[in-house]
Image (tube, coloured by chain):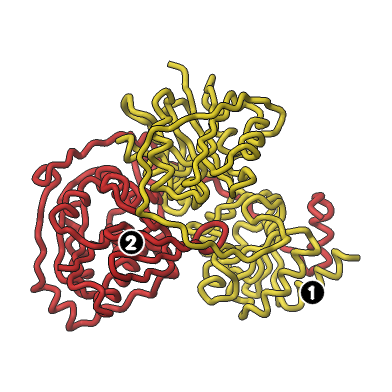
Amino acid sequence: MSSKVLIVAEHDGTKLNPSTAKCVTCARGITGAEITVVVCAADASAIASQAAQLAGVAKVLTVENPANAHLLAAVLAPQIVALAGPFTHVFGPSTTFGKDLMPRIAALLDTAQVSDVMATQSPTRFCRPIYAGNAILTVEFDGAAKIVATVRTASFEAAPNGGSAAIEKASVDAALPTHTRFVAVSAAKSDRPDLQTASRVISGGRALGSADAFKILYSLADKLGAAVGASRAAVDAGFAPNELQVGQTGKIIAPELYMAIGISGAIQHLTGIKDARTIVAINKDSEAPIFEVADFGLVGDLFQIVPELERLIGA
Amino acid sequence: MKRILVGIKRVVDYNVRIRVKPDGSGVITDGVKMSINPFDEIALEEALRIKERGGAEEVVVVTIGPADCQPQLRTALAMGADRALHVQADGVIEPLVAAKAILKLVEREQPLLVILGKQAIDDDNSQTGQMLAALWNRPQATFASKVELAEGKARVTREVDAGLETLEVDLPAVVTTDLRLNEPRYVKLPDIMKAKKKPLETLTLSAIGVEQKQRLKLVKFEPPPQRQKGIRVKDAAELVEALRTKGLL
């Protein structure tokens, strides 16, 4: 039986999130898969045309409804389930959006979910990290039910543009609950690149000592065009906001260059960066575990090294 | 009675260094320290605080797992839960089975809130809470960093990729906890003694009418690929030079 994959698009109301293009690449790993992207939004047109350009996408379905202005799992799940009939697989990204939504879909379909797919070995066989990435588990889906999965975005390149999929309006017959209401989202406005997709990331840990001291990282990041990240310890201490957290329970990222500054390198942090192409560690403790995984290690006082780096890079 | 149900899972303690068995059949758990999943401890702490503020009258903890889970249930009782439910089951319990089992207990206990950890640190699935909410046809507020109860409603702040999102949900509802929701209390010795006398009811999956179906076959476990150990540079200038040579600056 040939595979038909439905990918649930993540977006912010106007723009497609790059996580969707990574799901497309994951789905293309299934031989012969026919890929459909579904965009649920209040106004889907702009997002749908972005999805239609992704190479490998055969069709884009749009579900327009004022109730889809905010992507609430309880509201989206019944709509996706209503569309899922012809598909063998339903994929979403392993971002907070997909982690929230996809299990709700899986339960309504009475099927299992494969979380954080890092490789597809066959239409039914997948690899995923467990124990904070300390083990890789291969699972085989058993049975005829649909396969629901979240895609570990750091494991896949974004599908390039170059496609021209047909866009089709879908009408969905599903009762949508009103028991869950969006109130607000607060996000620090930033001109820096998005942490999840940035090619360079400067991350700070507990050793920074204060939110004020974190500014030296922002300054270096701006010089490099880098995003800023943080360890759990730094976020817990209030030095950086939660959306900057990198690690097992934060963001899993795969930049070209990752600079860990004043981060000791707990296993929970390392799991978030193991796919980084090059890791730089700057720490005054030469025994810090971060040096075990760093391509370049520099032992010393970050408060001297970081400004010097900024000066040298600018030179 | 205004009741909160809290799910807990027994997992390998987060300080233990995980090793894969040489034959690839699992990870080594023999003789390894087991604990309550840290996110579930946060879930229990939140339930206890809501009760202490007068928002609930009873906190019930539930786990699904082998007989060995009882010490973790006793720890939860020592933290302050009023009673415990243990659905005994051996072998793999997939999140969908766990959600179906908790739903049966929800129907029996009629809680106003179910609080679970956002993920277990062993399988890192992050599914059970969302699945329970789906099957129960009730709201879910996942990855919570703040929970405020009002009459018939909860306002929950969630840690999402963009920042912090606030939802308002009608009760009953499912909440899953993120790290910064609270800091769980330490258990005191007298509470451990008291916990021995608190009610702990043992059930089975078949007794509550849930089939222990396994849809994902565990084919093999492998250690992750190791990164090559890198080099030490002596100062910032050498680091910049090295990064330029690699074309990274």
Left-right relation of A97 to B18: right
Q: Which of the chains is yellow?
A: A
- The residue carrying mark 2 is B37
Q: From what the image shows, is residue A6 above or below residue B113?
A: above
Residue A36 image offset from top left, x and y in percent = 54, 28
Q: From what the image shows, is residue A45 above or below residue A256?
A: above
Residue A294 image offset from top left, x and y in percent = 65, 58
Q: Are marks 2 and 1 in contact (CB under 8 Å)?
A: no
Q: Residue lying furthest top in this view?
A: A1
Quarter of the image with the N terminus of chain A is: top left
Q: Report the disc number at residue A307.
A: 1
- Three-letter residue code for mark 1: Pro
- Three-letter residue code for mark 2: Asn
Q: Chain of mark 1?
A: A
Q: Chain of mark 2?
A: B
Residue B185, can we see it?
yes
Q: Residue lying furthest front in this view?
A: A66
Residue neighbourhood size for the residue with mark 2, other residues' Cα within 10 Å, grouped as few (<14), some (14–19), many (≥20): many
Residue A124 image offset from top left, x and y in percent = 42, 28
Decide which of B69, A230 is in the foreground and name it: A230
Quarter of the image with the C terminus of chain A is: bottom right
